[in-house]
Image: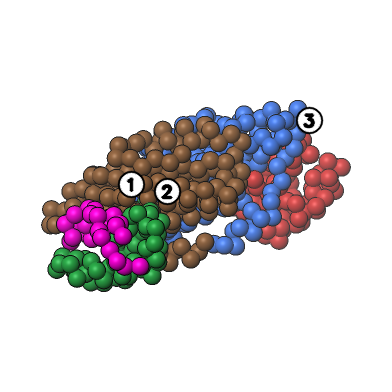
Chain colours: A brown, B green, C blue, D red
């Protein structure tokens, strides 16, 4: 399941619905990303994306992960728009027979979402607005796969 | 040829619009960028450091030396920061 | 939070309660382990443990994970007793500022839970009972850390 | 000395009880195992392949050459299979 949406969602509900449909898989891994406010100055995070390309790019990552780790299920939900500190930005869930596959696939999807899905984050703070810079470590993380 | 050019994040902010139709004689992305750079100061600024930019043709990530032939949509944006 | 219990629990609720208390952490990883029934023959999984040692062993793993990956929060829940196919056996959740730390810590905790927490699983099937054998790959996985 | 010996999983099933107090003159785990092996057939069976067994003293994993001195509780069990 893939959703790119502005609406908030409930990670626990997503996890339970996901777990209910993984059938005979023994291992479910989830990643939940939250808005951090390191300085205490953040008003909100503004997330922009490229409608159309976002769904294509994430769909391609999910297909690759599904095939490579033989996943039974795989879900990605990513929000865009205005998000307050501590709000849930996104979630990934993977299910496989064994834990190694579920962990690796979730890790892979996160690396690719970071650097290959067309999302851009802007921190809107009391002291001004800053586009979040990509980290070299994030682009380099792709070399792991 | 005509191509729709899209801008995202600070590229969109510097240029001041999210998308526009562009008439171009360029054969590749780099040629299109050269044309855009000469338009106005705000374009020159947005395209001053190509190493800080990424490009997609028809919603697929590609390189600045990719041919434009057949492209309907070319998008310029900074490195992505999702997740 | 550490719980060793026979009672069922709701992974979604655990995830949401966990996420609510991680404060300014950006990354939450969860692992949920379910009872698999590969043959369709399983009546239930019987899980035995060593009360006292279980809590000590898991507590020590959690302390190590918390220090090594600078976790803001860390939760382990593991059930014992009789579990039906597809029931939730256990869950691990980790929270850190960045995804790499949260992933590695959850992965580490799972490896140690598999091989160093005193739990033993017995598959009770229509065709007989079998104690689940440990896998060499599981013991070897500890060398990663 | 007296020590409480605990058995888990198939070790418990083979021996037929979960725990018992044992009077021992052994100085290490291996010595205790030797004493237990000579008790009865079911003990000999349970302790026939030490490579398939793990041991904990006072709820800490240890080795078969660990000294028993001061031990209150010694547990024998197969490799663990949690998670």
- Residue at mark 3 to residue at mark 2: CA–CA distance: 48 Å
Q: Position of residue A69 (x, y in %)?
A: 58, 50
The residue lying toward the viewer, choosing from D40 and B14, is B14
Circle 3 residues within 10 Å: few <14, some 14–19, many ≥20: few
SS at mark 3 in the image: loop
Total residue callouts: 3
What residue did someone put label 1 on?
Answer: A51
Up/down of A2 relative to A141, above or below: above
Up/down of D83 relative to B18, above or below: above
- Tell me whether the residue at label 3 lies in contact with that at label 2, contact meaning CB atoms closer than 8 angstroms: no
- Left or right: B6, with A27 as reference point: left
- Tell me whether the residue at label 1 lies in contact with that at label 3, contact meaning CB atoms closer than 8 angstroms: no
Which image quadrant is residue C81 in? top right
What residue did someone put label 2 on?
Answer: A56
- Left or right: A11, with C91 as reference point: left
| Chain of the residue that carries numbered disc 1 in the rendered image | A
Up/down of C95 relative to C41, above or below: below
Between disc 3 and disc 2, the foreground one is 2
| Chain of the residue that carries numbered disc 2 in the rendered image | A
Up/down of A140 relative to A30, above or below: below
What residue did someone put label 3 on?
Answer: C127
- Residue at mark 1 to residue at mark 3: CA–CA distance: 54 Å
Range shown magenta: B1-27
Which residue occupies 18% across, 48% down?
Answer: A43
Marks 1 and 2, the one that precedes in the sequence? 1
- Membership of B22 in magenta stretch: yes
The residue lying toward the viewer, choosing from D7 and A6, is A6
Q: Residue A67 bears which disc, if any?
A: none
- Left or right: D52, with C47 as reference point: right
| Chain of the residue that carries numbered disc 3 in the rendered image | C
């Amino acid at each position: 399941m893939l959703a790119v949406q502005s609406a908030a969602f409930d990670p626990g509900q997503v996890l339970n619905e996901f777990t209910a449909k993984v059938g005979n898989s023994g291992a479910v891994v989830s990643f939940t990303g939250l808005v951090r406010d390191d300085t205490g100055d953040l008003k909100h995070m503004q997330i922009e994306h490229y409608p159309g390309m976002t769904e294509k790019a994430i769909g391609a990552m999910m297909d690759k992960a599904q095939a490579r780790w033989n996943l039974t299920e795989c879900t990605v939900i990513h929000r865009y728009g205005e998000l307050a500190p501590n709000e849930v930005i996104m979630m990934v869930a993977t299910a496989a027979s064994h834990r190694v596959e579920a962990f690796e696939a979730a890790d892979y999807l996160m690396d690719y979402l970071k650097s290959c899905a067309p999302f851009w984050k802007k921190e809107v703070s009391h002291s001004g607005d800053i586009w979040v810079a990509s980290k070299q470590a994030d682009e380099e993380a792709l070399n792991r796969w | 040829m005509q191509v729709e050019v899209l801008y995202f994040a600070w590229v969109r902010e510097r240029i001041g619009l999210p998308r526009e139709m562009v008439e171009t004689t360029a054969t590749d992305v780099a040629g299109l960028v050269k044309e855009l750079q000469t338009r106005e100061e705000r374009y020159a600024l947005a395209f001053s450091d190509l190493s800080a930019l990424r490009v997609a043709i028809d919603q697929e990530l590609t390189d600045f030396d990719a041919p434009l032939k057949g492209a309907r949509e070319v998008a310029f944006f900074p490195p992505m920061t999702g997740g």
